[in-house]
Image (cartoon, grey):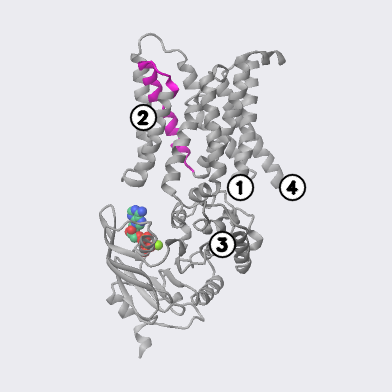
Amino acid sequence: MSKKLVEIQSLSVAYNGDNVLKDVDLDIYENDFLGVIGPNGGGKTTLVKAILGLAKPVSGSIQLFFDKGSIGYMPQISRFDTKFPISVFDVVLSGMAGKGKLPGKLSKKGQNKAKELLEQMGVIHLRKKAIGELSGGEMQRVFLCRSLISQPELLILDEPNTYVDNQFERDLFNELKKLNDRMAIMLVSHDVGTIAYYIKTIACVNRKLHYHPSNIITEKQLAAYDCPLQIITHGDVPHTVLKEHDKS
Amino acid sequence: MFSLFQYDFFINALYAAVLAAISCGIVGTYIVSKRIVFIGGGLSHASFGGIGLGYYFGFNPILGAAVFAVLSALGIEYTTKKASIREDSAIAILWAFGMAVGIIFVYITPGYAPNLMSYLFGSILTVSHLDLYLLIGLSILLILFFTTFFKPILYVAFDEDFARTQNIPVTKINYLLMSLIALTIVFNIRVVGIILVISLLTLPQIIANLFTKNFLTIILASIVIGLAGTLGGLAISYYLDIPSGATIIFFLVILFLIGRIVKWILSRR
Ligand SMILES: Nc1ncnc2c1ncn2[C@@H]1O[C@H](COP(=O)(O)OP(=O)(O)O)[C@@H](O)[C@H]1O
Ligand SMILES: [Mg+2]
C-alpha cells in the first residue's frame, strides 16, 4: 500500500456564492499519475488552487500528509504578466524560496540545482533573459524547472501543453513519466486524448468530480460522468481513449 | 551658480532632490513593474483629504496626508482581496473622497491657506526640515527593506499565487508595500505636488525600462534618471523663473523622448 499524500473530503468551493466545485472527494497517493480532465470552466484550476491553499473551501476538508512546501506547482501560463522585469534564472530560483531560513537567501547548492535543471531542459543559454523574451515553449520549460527545483513529492501541472508544439508536448509527457518514479503527478488538461497514454488514473471535473481508476475511458463513460469532452488524439500517440465504435 | 550654495533653502532643495530620486526610484520600480500606477494616482489624490483636515484642525498637513494615504492604501489592498468591489472602483471612490474632503476643509478654514499651492504643485525650494527628516527616514527604511527582502518582494510581485505556495508571507508583504507606496507618495508631494507626484514614480522607470528588463537595474537607473530630472528641472526652473514641480516633470518627459530616440537609433544599427 503506497503512502497517501492528499485526502479531499466533500469539498465545495464557491466564487461569489456560485459553487464551482461541489462535494468533491479525491485521494492522491505517492505513485499516482492522475489526469484531471474536464471542460473549460469546469473547475480544474479551482481544484488545484484548493489543494495549494489558494482557494478557500466553503465546506469539506483538504488534508496534506506532507509539507506544503513539497508541492511543485506549474500554473496555467495565461496568467502571467510576461512584461514583468524578472530574469529566467530568478524565476527558477523562486521555486526554492520556501526552503531557506530567510526567504530568498540562496545557497550555492540552490543555484547549481537551478543551472542543472535549465541545462536538462535545454534552456540554460536563456538564463539571463527576461522571462517575457522567451517563446511559449521555452517559458513552459522554465516554469517546469521552477516547479521541480524543490524536489517535490507531488507535482501539479495546470494545462502545461497550451502554447507548445507537439514535439515539446511529447518530450514533456515522457519526462513526466520518468519523474513519476520519484513523485506523484497531477496533470490537468482539457484534452483527455493527448494525456491518456501517460497517466494512470483519471478524474473528470465538471463542478462534481468523478474518479476513474484507469487511463482508458470511453466517450460514453465521459458522458455518464457529466464531463462532455471531445476526444482528440494526435497522430502517433497510442490510442487509449476509446470512442464507442472503437470498442467492437 | 556657486553663490546659490550659500543659501539654506537651496541646499535643502538639493537634499530633497537626492532623497526624492532614491525613494521614488525604489518604490516606483515596484509600481511600474506591477502595473499599479492607477493605485498611485488614487493615493496621491486621496491624501489631499488629510491636507484639508490639517489646515482646518491646525496640524501639519503632510502628517494628515500620510494618515489618509496609508489608510486608503490598506483599504484598497483589503477591498481587492476580500470584498467583491472592483479594484478600480475602490480607487476611484477613494480618489474622489479625498479630493472632496480636502477641498471642503480648505474652503471652510478661516483666513487663507498658506502654502496650499506648494501641496498641489510642489515647491522643492521651500521644503522644510521636517519634510527632509521624513524623506531621510523613509529612504533608509526603503533601502533596508528592499535589500533584506529583495527576492521575496520580487517573487511576490511577479507571481503572488506561486509565492504563497512557497510559504512566503505574501499578505504581510503586500500590506507593507502598499503602506510604503503611500508614504513615498505623500513625502514627495512637497517636491512636485499632488497632481504630478505619480509622474516622479513612473517616468524614470519607464525611461529605464526602455534599456533594461532587470528589476534591480531599473531601480538603480531610475534613481540616476530621477536625480537628473529633479536637478535638471530645478536648475531650469530657477533660471527661467517657472514652477519647479512642473519643470521637473516636463524635463523628465523630454528625457523620455530622448530615450526613445536613442533606443530607436540603437535598434537600427
Ligand atoms: N477568482 C475567480 N473569481 C470568480 N470566478 C472565478 C474565479 N476563478 C474561476 N472562476 C470561475 O470558476 C469557474 C471554474 O474556473 P476554473 O477552475 O478556472 O475552470 P477550469 O480550470 O476547469 O477551466 C469558471 O466559471 C470561472 O469563471
Ligand atoms: Mg484552468
Q: Is mark 2 within 8 Å of ligand 1?
A: no
Tell me the subunit letter for badge 3: A
Q: Give, as a single range, the part of the protein colored magenta.
A: B35-62
Q: Residue A5 location, x and y as percent?
A: 39, 70
Q: Using the rendered image, report if marks 3 and 4 lie on a common chain.
A: no
Q: Earlier in the sequence, mark 4 or mark 2?
A: 2
The residue at which mark 2 appears reads as B96
Alpha carbons under labels 3 and 2: distance apart: 43 Å
Horizontally, residue B267 falls left or right of residue A177, namely right
Amino acid carrying label 1: it is Asn
State ligand 2's quadrant: bottom left
Q: Residues within 10 Å of mark 1 (few under 14, many from 20)?
A: some
B121 or A230, nearer to the observer: B121
Alpha carbons under labels 4 and 2: distance apart: 48 Å
The residue at which mark 4 appears reads as B269
Q: Is mark 1 within 8 Å of ligand 1?
A: no
- Badge number at residue B214: 1
Q: Earlier in the sequence, mark 4 or mark 1?
A: 1
Check whether the beta carbons of the residues at disc 3 and disc 2 lie within 8 A of each other.
no
Amino acid carrying label 3: it is Val
Check whether the beta carbons of the residues at disc 3 and disc 4 lie within 8 A of each other.
no
Q: Earlier in the sequence, mark 1 or mark 2?
A: 2
